Image (cartoon, coloured by chain):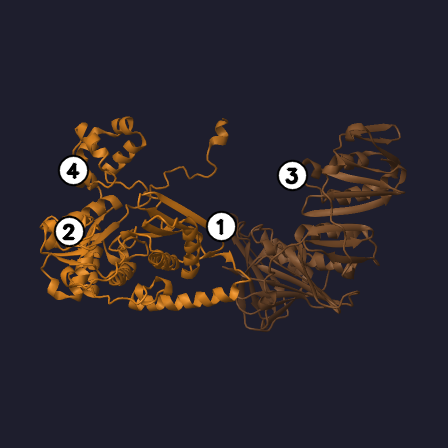
Chain colours: A brown, B orange
Amino acid sequence: MEFSVKKLDILKELNLAQGVVERKTTLPILSNLLLEAEEGLLRISATDLELGIRCACSAKTKKDGVGTVPAKRLLEIVRSLPDAEIKLKVLENHWVQVTCERSSFKLVGMAKDSFPVLPAVPKPLAAIPAPVLSNLIQKTIFAISSEESRYTLNGALLMLKPESVAMVSTDGHRLAMIERQIKIAGLSNELRLLIPKKAMGELLKLLAESDEAAHVELAKDESHLFFSVGGRILISRMLTGQFPNYEAVLPRDNNRVAELDKDLVTAAIRRVALLADERSRAIRVQLDKDKLEVFSSSGEYGEAHETLDAAFTGEPLQIGFDYQYLLDFLSVLSEGGKVRLELKDEQSAGQLRPSEQEAYQYRYVVMPMRI
Amino acid sequence: MNRALSQPLAPSTQDPTANIQPRSILHVDMDAFFVSVEELEDPSLIGKPVVVGADPEGRGVVAAASYEARKYGVHSAMPIRTAKKLCPHAIFLRGHHAKYGAYSEKIYDIFGEFTPVVEMVSIDEAYLDLTGTERLHGGPLVAADRLIRTVKERTGLNCSVGASTSHLVSKIASDQAKPHGLLYVFPGCEAKFLAPLPIRRMPGIGKVTEPELLSLGIATIGDLQTYGEQKLRERFGKYGEWLWTKSRGEDIEAYQYEEEPKSISHETTFDVDTGDQEEIERTLSYLAQLVARRLRDHQLFARTIGLKLRNERFRTITRDVSLDEPTHLDSVIFDIVLRLFEQAWKREEKIRLVGVRASNLEHGIFQRNLLEATARAKFDRAMEAADRLRSKFGFAAVQLARSLEPAKPEDKSGPAGKRPKTPKKREFLGRE
């Protein structure tokens, strides 16, 4: 294998691949990238066995072939090189030589045969506009559980229908749900996919690199999900198991509704949170006629209090929340605008949503704290 | 080290305990509690030797003996067969543990009227910290007298009270005062009060230490006092310091008195080692409810639930589980101990003792669960209602179905001879 590429072309792909490369070096080959040069194209693959990525860039191929290189080292080397043409060449014993202008590196590679075979991409089932999928992920990824024991909560549920797309995530304490009416090309039946959190994170990076008009093609085989966009493919092992019956926990009769200035309430919670108990992260929210008050107290440091104007006319209510759960939601909303806080009582789930909902219907359900 | 830096920042250099008045601790011990309850229910027992405990033919122990039975040398914790030998004509009762529980709760409520700091150490014994209640109840002597009368008036039961500045002295004093007596040790007289007592009377000196102390010529607590702190420490190290402090009637934990339990546990030993899964599970269910009830009494929630198992060969294991949402609910605690039990129990082994423990206690500030919210809220309300019924009718009034025996036999265990053969009953002697 011998080829040359432009630094910026290969750097972009190496950055994307790096997110997938196994960090713990359990299997040495998983710290390596698979490089395949063929007819003017360089294909780069990486996997940690849970997730795989295949991307490509154009290259001047002198001799077709395959090699593997330590991913992190190659990324660091390429990053450090001047913006110029970089040559790669497989030497004997799987070593790979990297040269650029006056610099030269020889990297210890491994036998290409020990690199795991990534599954082939099946026929696509549906295509979603890249910016739509990107928004769905951003609005839900933070509510996914990172407790490994809660296996089915380690991902979000993507629901595709011919006329709509929706994504839901929960960690058992709060739930984020977003949906949009949109024609989904190539779909006749409802399709429900459980996407692991790590795949969503890498997918976001891929989507950020693709252009506005691009579509993500979705496919699956028995145990994998495939996301193809802009010539790159992300492959994820499928999460099995039953996603909880989220519809049962969506509040229906939360009729204490307060309308709040989103930026003001976010800032107020951030300030009051400074003196919240560090372990429980509990703050107390009190709703009264036309105002909302936020309180915190920590045995160690003291207490804080802030009053906000709020459009509210219902029965007064005091309720406890984990401030981080509120901030997680508030900080993914776009700047400005108003947000609705819909409550029932101090022990039932509260709901938050942007007051002005246009293309997307977005809601966040959060259980209160017992205080 | 820089001298200036080592100075305290605030002028709080005096001994922080200097201004604290001596504490006022009562130890209240019910007189022959189980037997007295039986006598209330059946006055024909009064004045007769009565023994409450295990099956007199089995290998259990005496839970309580009337003062008449004690004259024959019968005492609690004695093997029941020995009791039968000593006093063959005694009336042997299996006991009505639900009733004892109900009386215990009544007594607990009375204690609560005297002070918020009540530490029930067992079903019939408690420490009350009356420090700072003098203006309300008068001195300890007046309060203790009123306590004894109130208990008698409202429950018909006798109790004995020891009063002093420490747990240790009050405990020994209540024992000296028995039956139906009151002994007050004036502040400053603790060491003098203890001095003539044999060392074995001091809790914490047992079979191992006693001979060693005797060999040093220490026979009474007074001997301990004269032996001196220095020599005790040289001989026994940390334990020597402990002996010295105790010998003068001081509580080791003085001034850092824990008003709140660090853990709550209940355990019980089976009459006969059992491999009957249903019986074990029934017992676990009952214990889980006791633990849950006490958590709710203290307004505490447990983040860790544990199971204790001891098999026929005395091998003891404990298993713990940490919860994502702390609980004080009977059913949640029971589900967990049941799961732990299923994992830990080897079917071929017989079980001697089971226990349920709640630890990692916290004050109920926690994140509620979304996915199980409806079920939990329902159960919360159910338990509130159950606790209301229980405080009216006793703990046994409301039970998880799992703790009930199938086709419950008649709960009237009369004197041993007449009693029909019924399945083995559990004993709840193992309460802390």
Residues under numbered marks 2 and 4 in contact, where contact means CB atoms less than 8 Å apart: no
Q: Give the residue at mark 3.
A: A24
Q: Nearer the viewer, mark 1 or mark 4?
A: 4
> Which chain letter matches label 3?
A
Which amino acid lies under the numbered mark 3 shown in the image of this protein? Lys
Q: The residue under label 1 is which amino acid type?
A: Gly
Mark 4 Cα-neighbour bin, 10 Å: few <14, some 14–19, many ≥20: some
How many labels were placed on the picture? 4
Q: In the rendered structure, are the residues bearing label 1 and label 3 in contact, judged by CB atoms less than 8 Å apart?
A: no
* Above or below, comparing residue A147 to residue A75 in the picture: below
Q: Is residue A308 left or right of residue A88?
A: left
Dot 3 crowding, Cα within 10 Å, few <14, some 14–19, many 20+: few
Residue A55 visible, this angle: yes
Q: Position of residue B106 (x, y in %)?
A: 26, 63
Q: Are marks 1 and 3 on the same chain?
A: yes
Real-space CA distance between mark 1 and mark 2, rounded to the nearest whole angstrom: 45 Å
Q: Residue at x 43, y 68 (%)?
A: B381
Q: CA distance from mark 3 to mark 4?
A: 66 Å
Q: Are the numbered discs 2 and 3 placed on the same chain, yes or no?
A: no
Q: Which residue is mark 1?
A: A299
The residue pinned by badge 4 equals B198
